[in-house]
Image (spheres, grey):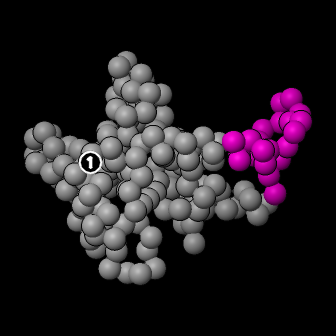
Amino acid sequence: MMLDGYNVIHAIERYKSLSRESLESARYALLDDLVDYQAFTGDAVVVVFDAYTAKGKKIKREMFKGVVVIYTKEHQTADSYIESEVERLVQDPKHLVRVVTSDWAEQQLVMGSGAVRMTPREFRFELERVRQAIQERLPKQVKTGDSIEAQLSGEAKALLDAIRKGNSS
């Protein structure tokens, strides 16, 4: 799954309201949600943020708890980065590529290339579904003072640790 980060932030009220105070807070809230989403679904997640107007910037790739974060280079939009990556990824039939954006032109290009588009509204519903499913899987009564980590099996701890380190294989 690829997301146009700022597009999603400005389209979903939770992130939008955070961005009024601090764009960085909105980015981290989105990234935290994407970490949970990726851990639950097993889908690879890439979020792309524009650095279009940042002088002298080159593409910057980071890992945030297993989620790939891309900051585009100067004069490159998130849309153009996503378009080129989608074209590359759909060449391999093993890849089902989903792109989250509210940009209509981007949605048309994505669908025309063979990828699946998802609006931020649809993604918000998907996030809510995942959150609910996570809550349903948590123990009904969590002992006071027990951390979630203390309740996980050794295998679950190892898997989450691998995801955090970016080794989900």
Q: Give the range drawn in magenta.
A: 132-153
Residue ID at (26%, 48%): 104
**Image position of 48 (left or right of 93):** left
Q: In this view, does 90 lie above or below 84?
A: below
Residue shown at 13% from the left, 39% from the top: 53
Q: Mark 1 points at which residue?
A: 104
**Residue 145 lies in the magenta stretch:** yes
Q: Report the residue at 30% width, 61% height from top.
A: 110
- Secondary element under disc 1, as helix, strand or loop, is helix
Whole-percent x, y for residue 49 in the image: 29, 45
Q: Does residue 104 appear left or right of residue 45 in this picture?
A: left
Q: Residues within 10 Å of mark 1 (few under 14, many from 20)?
A: few
Residue 42 highlighted magenta (yes or no): no
Between 75 and 120, the residue placed more toward the observer is: 120
Q: Is residue 87 left or right of residue 166?
A: left
Query: In the rendered view, would you say 29 is above or below 96?
Result: above
Residue 145 spot, x, y in % from top left: 83, 30
- Residue 31 image position (x, y, % from top left): 47, 42
- Counting labels gives 1
In the rendered image, is residue 62 in sight? Answer: no
Q: Which quarter of the figure is the N terminus placed in?
A: bottom left
Of residues 77 and 112, the one nearer the viewer is 112
Q: Which amino acid does label 1 sit on?
A: Trp
Quadrant containing the C terminus in the rendered view: bottom right
